[in-house]
Image: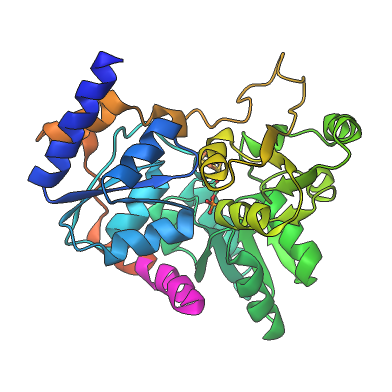
Amino acid sequence: DVRKAELKSKIKALLKEKNATMVAHYYTDPEIQALAEETGGCVADSLEMARFGRDAKEQTLLVAGVKFMGETAKILSPEKRVLMPTMEATCSLDLGCPVEAFSAFCDQHPDHTVVVYANTSAAVKARADWVVTSSIALEIVEHLDSLGKPIIWGPDRHLGAYIAKQTGADMLMWQGECIVHDEFSAQALQDMKALYPDAAVLVHPESPASVVAMADSVGSTSQLIQAAQDMPNQMFIVATDKGIFYKMQQLMPEKQFVEAPTAGNGATCKSCAHCPWMAMNGLEAIYQSLSTDDAATHEIFVDDALREKALIPLNRMLDFSA
Ligand code: 13P
Ligand code: SF4
């Protein structure tokens, strides 16, 4: 509509004027991903977002995603301005892992290596030995396990259980979960598979173990997109946030993608396969973040001492994956 077209052209002009680039996650709404692409920014998974932000030549990063992604960008590029459409966009994993309690848990097991998911606050990262994203978690835990190290894992218990199962590593788990993936239902997926017997099942490892067990491919958002390209199937049942369909349909217009069912079959689901925090990244909010000079409402700041500590485990991940 007219307002949207007007906002898009204003955003494009502001990105140029402010020497800014936009980096968006696959879970943001299609029009946000399209805008990032049109303006020479990037649409990516969490690990690629971190790399893109770090390497961008622009002085300002507009991060369309959730708070931990903005914080990660700032930790990696303290000299850049990092803007977010809204500071309200958080993550249930981050919320469910307050630093005081997590730190106390780590203190009880001083012989353990602390591995945290990127979906955490800067303070939790600062308490960790390693940061991982879902695309690299398996390899990093395999590596640590080969050194014979017991691990504290936080905060996603489903991703942790998947990795422990795959690697056999000794892992003590924090009990957090993603509200979006936690809702996928193995029972309902069984019924859907019966309906579409030729469809392959793609599952993000933040999903419950019973759903992961039914997957033909398990991986991060980027890895699931790649799997759909590599597999011969014409149809896919996808257990992750529905934002990912934008890129899947763009790359594979001839293939068909259906949402994996959530408990309650859509009647009573809470997130219904779309993250409420990712959905906050609308055009109005993006326009506001670029047009205002009120740093308190849109700019990410990370305390210096915390930043220096959090940078160490983040760089370990980036160096490991390079
Ligand atoms: P990835 O894009 O790294 O798979 O992360 C998924 C996620 O939940 C981000 O919030
Ligand atoms: Fe967090 Fe899940 Fe939303 Fe990702 S989709 S930001 S893991 S709540």
Query: Residue lying farthest front?
Result: 254
Q: Closer to the camera, 240 or 95?
A: 240
Q: Is residue 320 above or below residue 72?
A: below
Please give left or right for residue 48 compared with residue 295 in the image.
Answer: right
Q: Which residues are magenta?
A: 311-322
Tell whether position 314 is magenta: yes
x, y percent for residue 56: 25, 62
Q: Is residue 276 visible?
A: yes
Nearer to me, 254 or 30: 254
Q: Dividing the image into four equal quarters, which quarter contains ligand 2?
A: top right
Q: Position of residue 316 (x, y in %)?
A: 45, 75
Q: Is residue 264 shown above or below 54?
A: above
Q: Residue at x 26, y 45 (%)?
A: 39
Give me the residue at 58% from left, 34% from top: 242
Name the residue rendered at 63%, 76% in the picture.
Answer: 111
Extreme residue toward the bottom, this view: 147
Magenta run includes residue 116: no
Q: Residue at x 31, y 15 (%)?
A: 1
User: Is 263 situated above or below 230?
Assistant: above
Q: Is residue 297 left or right of residue 241?
A: left
* Image position, residue 129 (x, y; %): 50, 71
Q: Main secondary structure of the magenta part?
A: helix
- Residue 25 lies left or right of residue 288; in this view the side is right
